[in-house]
Amino acid sequence: MDVQVAAARRCTIHEFDQTKLIKKEKLTAILEAGRLSSSVQDKDVWIFWVVDHREDLELLATVGKRRGKDTKHVALAPVTIALTAPQFGWASERLRLHYDLGQAAMSMQLSAASMEIGSCVAIVDDARVAAEVLKLKPNMVCPYLLTLGYPSRSLGTIPAPRRRPTSDVARWLRTK
Ligand SMILES: Cc1cc2nc3c(=O)[nH]c(=O)nc-3n(C[C@H](O)[C@H](O)[C@H](O)COP(=O)(O)O)c2cc1C
């Protein structure tokens, strides 16, 4: 699928088809899209943990904001990729890391969408539980989860999310 089409089709999915698992080669392709994503100064510090054991998914489903409400979809999804990275001390380093993780997540979401696989990024609020589930080393953190699965409705039939028009979000500084 064309990148432009995947960008138009990508949307957050919370409800997944329980009967359809993601084949390993497709999951590998999604991870590859994340791996190839760019990072500030090419630092490439992330590790993407693939979580597909139901018990682990149920625990990860509790780590979101609003006492886990924002991650409850994780419990019923076939797979979640936990985006992990070193815990940086400097605020500027942390900002760059979040930009990098956002880029990697979007590359993976686009790759997923191109294969009709739905996704949802979620913020980890309870970092301690996430670290326990993932058995992270003490210097590592997991700020985001990327949940994947075939949507219960096909991506093309889901209404586009509300967006401001291009004329509002993109402006030409001056016209030639
Ligand atoms: C950084 C980030 C964090 C998000 N955190 C959550 C979350 O914790 N739980 C959730 O259900 N969705 C989360 N989302 C999904 C957004 O709510 C969603 O992207 C937004 O509503 C736009 O919808 P769309 O992705 O379909 O375009 C997050 C998205 C981003 C980019």
Image (cartoon, rainbow, N blue to C red):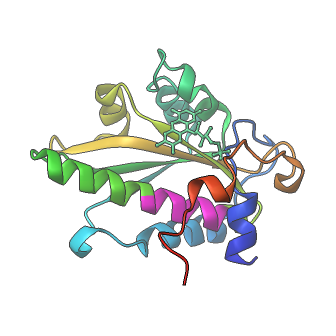
Q: Is residue 30 left or right of residue 56?
A: right
Q: Is residue 110 above or below residue 140?
A: below
Figure quarter occupied by ligand 1: top right
Residue 111 among magenta residues? yes
Q: Is residue 55 magenta?
A: no
Instruction: Please tell me in which quadrant of the rendered image residue 116 appears.
Output: bottom right
Q: Quadrant of residue 117?
A: bottom right
Q: Is residue 24 left or right of residue 15?
A: left
Residue 102 in percent (x, y) is at 43, 54
Q: Residue at x 48, y 16 (%)?
A: 66
Q: Residue at x 26, y 68 (%)?
A: 40
Q: Is residue 117 above or below residue 42?
A: above
Q: Residue furthest top?
A: 67
**x, y percent for residue 80:** 54, 46
- Asked whether residue 47 is in view, the answer is no
- The magenta stretch is 103-112
99 or 79, nearer to the observer: 99
Q: Residue furthest bottom?
A: 176
